Image (cartoon, rainbow, N blue to C red):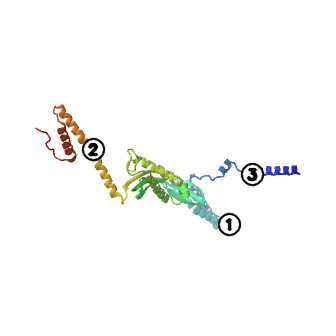
Amino acid sequence: MESINNDENDLLNKEEGIISTSSKKPDNQENEGLVVEKKEKILHLKKGAEVWKRVCRVFLISLVIFISSLIIAVATEFYYLLIITGISTLGILYGICFVLCCSCGFITILPNEAVVYHFYGRYLGTVKDNGYFYGYPFSKARKVSLKTFEYNGNRLKVNERDGNPVELGIIILWRIGDTFKAIFDVENYNSFIEAQSEAAIRYIGCKYPYEPIIPGEISLRSGHEIINKELKQELERRIHVSGIIIEDARVTEISYGAEVAKMMLQKQASNAAVFAKEAIVKGATNAVMYSLNEFEKNGIQFNNDDKANYVTDMMNTLCMGSGLSKILTS
């Protein structure tokens, strides 16, 4: 009995193992089950003039048959020809309905313009050719401009890396590259690029200081090319889902916030004054040393007291603008 129970348990374990292994899918099958990202599908429509010729040809043939059968029926009094006339009349009506239906499918596409077709919720494709074409009569066509647009953003107040409020203004040149993503993946691509541009400029503004603290450091004022390049890359990363292509992105305005502008201007003025004083002192020192060397070359000797008085008076004159006093003794 125990051996029979053991055999039954082994069979059950084998069956469970078979069921568990069959329920697991390989990784490649799971990947195949994922939804494939849809991309833009380019369509090429028939020329509108050629379709009009065919439509007009069918209509004229129906009209000629109708008129010919009517004339023959009246002239020969053959009533059976009235049946042909009725059939021709139906042909005329069919031709008129055909023309009306076909007229709904003609569309004109201007340069730098595309038309997106979708039929009862199903994406058919995008037409980017320019001219007069015959498309899908009963589908919905949405025109999309492929021109380059300019977005001139409002000045945004951002806290830079050191916490000081600054105001930044940007300008972006963009165009639609993938019409499927621009129409179906985002609600409104104009509002989308406006929101993402503000987020990108806030990210860049918080990453760098307004002025370089360490010599050679990248800042908002000094690193224009690097800042603009990084801004473009950040925008491309954020709006990739919308199918929009960023052609150029630049920071146009950089200034301190109104609440700290006065203090920061005073700081800049004081820093400029310090740099100016350093340059003046350095130049005055070089001038005094040069004059003393020239005196020694010409045989004019100063004692230590006269040399100290000369240096003091010359430095005051060059740095402070005071007059030169007599320092040489007779």
Q: Mark yes or no: residue 111 visible.
A: no
In the depicted view, which residue is nearer to us: 94 or 242? 242
Residue topped by disc 1: 83
Numbered disc 3: secondary structure: helix
Q: Is mark 2 on a helix, strand or loop?
A: helix
Residue 88, given in percent of the width and then of the height, sits at 64, 64
Q: Judge whether 51 appears above or below 293 on screen.
A: below
Q: Which residue is labeled 3 in the image?
A: 20
Q: Which label lies toward us, 1 or 3?
A: 3
Task: Check disc 2 and give the amino acid type.
Answer: Ala
Q: Nearer the viewer, residue 184 or 210?
A: 210
User: Residue at the location (22% across, 36% down)?
Assistant: 290
- Residue at 38%, 54% in the rendered image: 253
Tell whether label 3 touches label 1 (CB within 8 Å).
Answer: no
Q: Is residue 165 left or right of residue 142?
A: left
> x, y (%) of residue 256?
37, 56
**Residue with the mark numbered 2:** 279
Which residue is at a point 61% across and 65% down the rendered structure image? 93
297 w.r.t. 51: above or below: above
**What's under tag 1, amino acid-wise?**
Ile
